[in-house]
């Protein structure tokens, strides 16, 4: 039996999301969201490995390079390590929507590849994202999709206001403080 994982969208879940058609292309534009460190520590303590799954079409559109993205991810990884958080891997799709690749969310390619690469039990894992493309990718990959934010989402099993709220929910569930209905809580 494989390991269980939390697949995390990056922008809007781990760090602040910039307005549409703006990209986090430098370390100075990367800002962790409140509660993220605490949330990731809780998830790690619950036995989940942490993997980032992120669309980065700013590369295809020429707004940043792979090297720019690597600098941002190195910074993110370093800051997480300072808080005792082990980020297992980061998968990114550099393609434009019109390229119809199998890795760009809502396609499940990055999740399925990570599942094979890290021997992950997808049925015991979660995809946490702030958009329908994130939750659709999770559903298509066979993981439980969680939506961050209050917008309705037919692909999400549950919705939480923040990653920390979701992590604390899983902790309460693991501690036996929640009943069976906890799996389908919404908004």
Image (cartoon, helix red, strand yellow):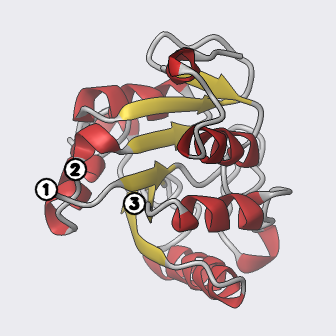
**Among numbered discs 2 and 1, the one appearing first in the sequence:** 1
Tell me the mark number nearer the camera, choosing from 1 and 3.
Answer: 1
Where residue 74 sits, quadrant-wise, is bottom right
Residue under label 1? 1
What residue is drawn where x is 70% and y is 37%?
20
Q: Is residue 43 above or below residue 86?
A: above
Q: Are marks 1 and 3 in contact (CB under 8 Å)?
A: no
Q: Which residue lies at the image location 47% right of the left edge and 35% below the top edge?
A: 134
Judge left or right: residue 145 versus residue 159: left
Q: Earlier in the sequence, mark 1 or mark 3?
A: 1
**How many neighbours does mark 3 have within 10 angstroms: few (below 14), some (14-19), or many (20 or more)?**
some
Looking at the picture, tell me which residue is in the foreground, 39 or 177. 177
Mark 2 Cα-neighbour bin, 10 Å: few <14, some 14–19, many ≥20: some
Task: Tell me the mark number nearer the camera, choosing from 2 and 1.
Answer: 1
Q: Quadrant of the C terminus?
A: top right
Q: Tell me the CA gap for discs 3 and 2.
A: 21 Å
Determine whether 72 is above or below 131 in the image. below
Q: Which residue, given by chain and number where applicable, does mark 3 sit on?
A: 92
Q: Is residue 52 above or below residue 80?
A: above
Residue 7 at what x, y percent from top left?
A: 43, 51
Residue 178: x and y in percent read 62, 28
Mark 3 vs 2: CB contact within 8 A = no
Q: Does residue 176 show up?
A: yes
| Mark 1 surroundings: few (<14), some (14-19) or many (≥20) residues within 10 A | few
Residue 180 position within the rendered picture, expressed as x and y whole percent measured from the top left: 50, 19
Residue 16 locus on image (x, y percent): 78, 53
- Which residue bears the numbered disc 2? 121
Cα distance between the residues tagged 1 and 3:
26 Å
């Amino acid at each position: 039996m494989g390991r269980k994982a939390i697949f995390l969208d990056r922008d809007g879940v781990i760090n602040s999301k910039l307005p549409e058609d703006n990209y986090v292309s430098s370390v100075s534009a990367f800002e962790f969201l409140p509660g993220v460190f605490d949330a990731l520590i809780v998830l790690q303590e619950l036995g989940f490995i942490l993997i980032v799954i992120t669309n980065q079409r700013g590369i295809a559109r020429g707004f940043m390079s792979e090297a720019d993205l690597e600098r941002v991810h190195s910074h993110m990884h370093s800051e997480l390590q300072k808080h005792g958080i082990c980020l297992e891997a980061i998968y990114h799709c550099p393609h434009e929507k019109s390229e119809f690749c199998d890795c760009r969310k809502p396609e499940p390619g990055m999740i399925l590849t990570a599942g094979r690469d890290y021997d992950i039990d997808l049925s015991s894992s979660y995809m946490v994202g702030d958009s329908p493309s994130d939750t659709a990718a999770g559903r298509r990959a066979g993981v439980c999709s969680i939506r961050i934010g209050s917008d309705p989402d037919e692909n999400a099993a549950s919705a939480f206001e923040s990653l920390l709220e979701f992590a604390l929910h899983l902790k309460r569930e693991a501690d036996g403080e929640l009943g069976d209905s906890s799996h389908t809580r919404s908004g």
